[in-house]
Amino acid sequence: MKKIMLCCSAGMSTSLLVKKMLDAAQQRGLEVEIKAFGVAEFDQQIGNYQVVLLGPQVKYLQQDLQRKADAFGVRVEPINMMDYGMQKGDAVLDFALSLIDAAH
């Protein structure tokens, strides 16, 4: 099972994108766990996921969050602005899966 965490300022703006990503995964028959959290929950959640995708409003935190994630061997990357804005769940899912696959 692939475990993907989305992170934004409060966990709200990425929740719709999570649903679209889950729909895309279900159509492909992929086993994934995708959840959205606010940045405040990052420290408690990071160890449970294989990759973290950042919403545009928190991508400025990428370096700080990556330093914390390094202890767990987890990549932290911003979501493509166009994919985020257009809520392209399939494209964001592909990006997350490519990061997980690259790590192994």
Image (cartoon, rainbow, N blue to C red):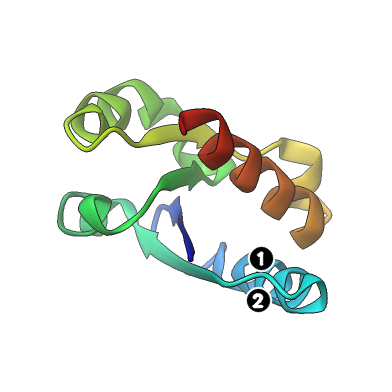
The picture quadrant where one finds residue 89 is: bottom right
Q: Residue furthest front?
A: 104
Judged left or right of residue 61, residue 72 is: left
Q: Compared with residue 13, is residue 8 higher up or lower down, i.e. above or below? A: above
Q: Is residue 58 above or below residue 8?
A: above
Q: Is residue 36 above or below residue 43?
A: below
Q: Mark 1 Cα within 10 Å, few/some/many (few <14, many 20+)?
A: many
**CA–CA distance between discs 1 and 2?**
5 Å
Q: Residue at x 43, y 52 (%)?
A: 7
Is 103 on the left or on the right of 69, as rendered? right
Counting other residues with Cα less than 10 Å from the Cα at mark 2, is it few (<14), some (14-19), or many (20 or more)? some
Q: Locate residue 45, reporting x and y percent.
A: 24, 58
- Residue 32 in percent (x, y) is at 55, 69
Task: Provide residue 47's location: percent of width, then percent of height.
Answer: 22, 52
Q: Secondary structure at mark 1?
A: helix
For label 2, the SS is helix
Residue 55 in picture, x, y percent from top left: 54, 46
Based on the displayed image, in which of its 4 quarters is residue 82 positioned?
top right
Who's the residue at 47% across and 33% down the image?
104
Task: Give the residue at x 43% y 45%.
Answer: 52
Residue pointed to by mark 1: 17
Q: Can residue 72 be seen from the camera position used here?
A: yes
Q: Amino acid at mark 2?
A: Lys
Pick whichever, 78 or 103, lies toward us: 103
Residues at marks 1 and 2 touching, judged by CB atoms closer than 8 Å: yes
Which amino acid is tagged 1? Leu
Instruction: Tell which of 39 and 52 is nearer to you.
Output: 52
**Residue carrying label 2:** 19
Q: In the picture, residue 86 is in which quadrant?
A: bottom right
Q: Nearer the viewer, residue 49 or 11?
A: 49
Q: For this view, does 92 lie left or right of residue 70?
A: right
